[in-house]
């Protein structure tokens, strides 16, 4: 059995490219992970997700523990078999979504109790329970259970929260145990404060993890503040392990994060946007519901090789979006995920070739052009 | 260019098997046509519909004339290109759906005026306008514009309606014109009355069509009454042309219709049921939302080769249905369409082999078994 390892193959400035090896397959970095919340990347079959170029999916512990439950997924052979995806899966710890979705939350040193947003049933998450759930799911990359304060927050709140998360990181490591071929990632906290981020990184290094996430960003602080933090945070983490920026982001967020030394990201944006008619192309963002597309025989992007662009006009995609047909979500999600994976491949190639700065200029120039003129 | 033709290859009792040749490809009969109402078979990509074994789709004139409009589809290169399906398409005349969906309908000798169910806009359909719309769509098999009374209705209403439809059939034939490679089908009316059906068939024969539909059934009369009518109606139509039963039906309706000499059918049932969780298998019907499937690791049908059965447990399909995930509609629709096309292939093979009676016994025995026992 291949053990979990990270091979840093090249750098260009602070940007990095490499390969994470796991028993379920390689993950080329920088990597974008589509989100499969409830054991499905919404509106996509797993084979189609793979066709877009995804090496790994993200699953949500919070959603899966509530429905269909981790115990049920375990009894059915684990999440990979359940959702028909045999490549790597990363699961979050559940902590972040408890804070954003559940009601009647109560936070103690032990963990969090809360009520399900689905049926009001009462549940507990702690470092130990989160590790147990992620083991039952069969996750390849397990995330530490942490607490993440919304920004802005005052420094003392951020420091207290970070220190709690570091104690939970230690408990997560102990509860994870010895699981060859599986990885546990620590999560750096500390808000936008360089010294707190440094203390958090030091605490995590002492415990020791197979990878390290920059947590607590993309929570409302804005791109400038996030990039400001990413100017120092990744460098505080071990160079020889993967660095994962959680919940990011828009295409330019992703490019800026990679330029600052991030190796992995996840976001619901490409799939959620596919369902709301927002489309990402080399030329920025377009909204398919706009009347300008109604008679337009051109594809979303003439250079894109996804099924939506190879088979359909903007006029068709406009029609099926307006008609609320399921095929609209299917095609636009596929296109957006394809665009995101193309973006990652472009960055991997440019970093390997030492041309990442020129690639970034071209990326920003393309977006500045805006969508093609209406016919 | 291949012209439109029908080659009757074999019979077994009254059941028939053959091939309809068109410039866009062959249609193996008996044929089941999935319904692509608004230029999409709901929750399916066209390539997937083809993978189930479909040779031809049905498009709805009423829906398409309202949105995105026939003129827009024509300007975009026709319905085949618009919806990315290059094989044959049959379009209905719009008449039936005006009666079932539109409001403020007014019927005259000339045609029907009505208001759109989408935006209340006013429209007219007549034999001439229906032929024009179906030509703009680029339909391969065009249906005559007819009137179809709901059953039960009294004999004089049925006779009047049938006579109006026959006058409209003549106008449809004239308006259709000379279109090599395209076919116009006449529609027999006359309710459940053998003599009126005979008069209708005679009127249609005199006009002359490339195929003939049995219209006015599957409108609430029940299977016994429908089969009673099918015991005589198909035989009244020309033997050397395809016979199409409109809007049918459940699997046992389809088998009974084929046994009575029908060559083509269409129905929304397999696709609509896929969205509501109703699943067709060799053993009858099951509802995936039932709790009995919650922990069931088995596929819907262990002998089925569709993606839903090859890749997923009943437990997974139950989970994604309950979670209202789009993949539920995608997988269950695919399964149901696959089941329907398997059914048609089974009948084609059995009729060709002269074993259709034994095949029917096996079909009914399988359904009588009911779904597999819960685990």
Image: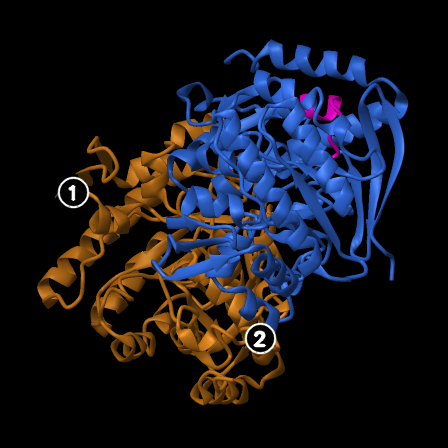
Chain colours: A orange, B blue
Q: Quadrant of residue B231?
A: top right
Specify whether residue B261 is painted magenta.
Answer: yes
Q: Quadrant of residue B81?
A: bottom right
Query: Are there few (<14), some (14-19), or many (20+) residues within 10 Å of tag 1?
Result: some
Disc number lying in front (1 or 2): 2
Q: Where's the N terminus of chain A, which quadrant?
A: top right
Residue A95: mark: none
- Tell me if residue A59 comes above or below residue A331 in the rendering: above
Residue carrying label 2: A297
- Tell me if residue A289 comes above or below residue A328 in the rendering: below
Give how far across and how far down residue A292 sits, in percent.
43, 78
Give how far across and how far down residue B345 sits, in percent.
77, 31
Q: Earlier in the sequence, mark 1 or mark 2?
A: 1
* Distance Cα–Cα, label 1 vs label 2: 47 Å
Give A217 or B293, whichever is nearer the viewer. B293
Give how far across and how far down residue A203 sits, in percent.
28, 58
Number of numbered tags placed on the structure image: 2
Give B122 or A310, whichever is nearer the viewer. B122
Give A11 or A239, whichever is nearer the viewer. A11
> Which chain hosts label 2?
A
Specify whether residue B341 is painted magenta.
Answer: no
Residue carrying label 1: A103
Q: Secondary structure at mark 1?
A: strand
**Residue A31 visible somewhere in the drawing:** no
Stretch in magenta = B256-264
């Amino acid at each position: 059995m291949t053990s979990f390892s990270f091979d840093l193959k090249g750098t260009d400035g602070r940007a990095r490219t490499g390969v994470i090896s796991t028993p379920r397959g390689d993950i080329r970095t920088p990597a974008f992970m589509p989100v499969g919340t409830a054991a499905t990347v919404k509106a996509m079959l797993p084979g189609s997700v793979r066709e877009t170029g995804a090496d790994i999916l993200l699953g949500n512990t919070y959603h899966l523990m509530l429905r269909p439950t981790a115990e049920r997924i375990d009894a059915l052979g684990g999440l990979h078999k359940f959702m028909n995806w045999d490549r790597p899966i990363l699961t979050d710890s559940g902590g972040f979504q408890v804070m954003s979705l559940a009601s009647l939350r109560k936070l103690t040193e032990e963990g969090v109790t809360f009520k399900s947003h689905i049926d009001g049933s009462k549940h507990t998450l702690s470092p130990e329970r989160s590790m147990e759930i992620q083991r039952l799911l069969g996750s390849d990359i397990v995330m530490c259970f942490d607490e993440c304060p919304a920004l802005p927050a005052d420094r003392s709140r951020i420091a207290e929260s970070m220190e709690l998360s570091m104690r939970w990181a230690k408990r997560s490591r102990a509860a994870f145990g010895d699981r060859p071929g599986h990885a546990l990632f620590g999560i750096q906290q500390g808000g936008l404060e360089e010294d707190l981020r440094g203390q958090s990184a030091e605490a995590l290094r002492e415990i020791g993890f197979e990878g390290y996430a920059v947590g607590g960003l993309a929570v409302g602080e804005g791109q400038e503040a996030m990039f400001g933090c990413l100017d120092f945070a990744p460098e505080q983490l071990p160079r020889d392990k993967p660095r994962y920026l959680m919940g990011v982001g828009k295409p330019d967020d992703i490019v800026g994060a990679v330029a600052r030394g991030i190796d992995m990201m996840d976001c619901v944006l490409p799939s959620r946007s596919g369902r709301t008619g927002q489309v990402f192309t080399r030329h920025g963002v377009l909204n398919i519901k706009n009347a300008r597309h109604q008679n337009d025989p051109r594809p979303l992007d003439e250079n894109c090789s996804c099924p939506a662009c190879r088979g359909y006009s903007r006029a068709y995609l406009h029609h099926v979006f307006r008609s609320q047909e399921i095929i609209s979500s299917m095609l636009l999600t596929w296109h957006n995920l394809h665009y995101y994976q193309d973006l990652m491949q472009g960055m991997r190639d440019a970093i390997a070739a030492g041309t990442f700065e020129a690639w970034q200029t071209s990326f920003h120039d393309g977006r500045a052009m805006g969508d093609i003129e209406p016919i």
